[in-house]
């Protein structure tokens, strides 16, 4: 006496094949269930791309800062210019007027809050 379940007859014949079933389970496992699944790999690849862009930015920034440091060490006029522009230093008998663009003004007000 063979007992046949009715729901098995409703499954298409191609999905009853053990090889197709194995391949479908493998694809589901690799895509969703594994710790190194495709979704996690995609997120990691996006993060890696972002980090490479950041690395290029910081390498360029380091080069610019090295050049500025070299200029400051070699010429005292550049050192005075840097101090006046960056730290708003002035001589005792001078008046200092600061003119800001609207974007610079917003940055300063955000920092103060």
Image: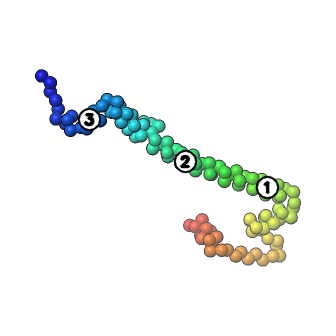
Residue 112, horizontal then vertical, whole percent:
59, 67
Give the mark nearest the N terminus, 1 or 3: 3
Query: Label for residue 47?
Result: 2
At a point 15% along the width and 27% down the height, the residue shown is 3
Query: Label for residue 67?
Result: 1
Residue 37, horizontal then vertical, whole percent:
45, 39
Farthest residue to the left: give it.
1
Q: Is the N terminus in the top left, top right, bottom left or bottom right quadrant? A: top left
Label 2, label 3: how far apart the Cα atoms are: 43 Å
At a point 34% along the width and 30% down the height, the residue shown is 19
In the image, 65 versus 55, the foreground residue is: 55
Say if 74 sits above or below 85 in the image. above
Residue 16, horizontal then vertical, whole percent:
27, 33
Q: Which residue is mark 3?
A: 13
At a point 54% along the width and 47% down the height, the residue shown is 47
Asked if disc 1 and disc 3 are in contact, CB closer than 8 Å, the reply is no
Say if 96 sits above or below 61 in the image. below
Label 1 Cα neighbours within 10 Å, binned few <14 / some 14-19 / many ≥20: few
Residue depth check, mark 2 versus mark 3: number of the one nearer the observer: 3
In the image, 48 versus 87, the foreground residue is: 48
Label 2 Cα neighbours within 10 Å, binned few <14 / some 14-19 / many ≥20: few
């Amino acid at each position: 006496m063979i007992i046949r379940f009715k729901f098995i007859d409703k499954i298409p014949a191609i999905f009853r094949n053990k090889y197709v079933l194995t391949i479908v389970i493998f694809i589901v496992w690799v895509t969703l269930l594994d710790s190194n699944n495709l979704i996690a790999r995609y997120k990691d690849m996006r993060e890696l791309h972002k980090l490479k862009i950041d690395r290029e930015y910081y390498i360029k920034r380091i080069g610019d800062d090295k050049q500025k440091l070299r200029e400051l060490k070699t010429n005292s006029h550049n050192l005075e210019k840097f101090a006046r522009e960056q730290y708003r230093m002035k001589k005792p008998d001078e008046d200092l007027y600061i003119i800001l663009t609207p974007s610079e003004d917003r940055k300063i007000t955000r920092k103060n809050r």
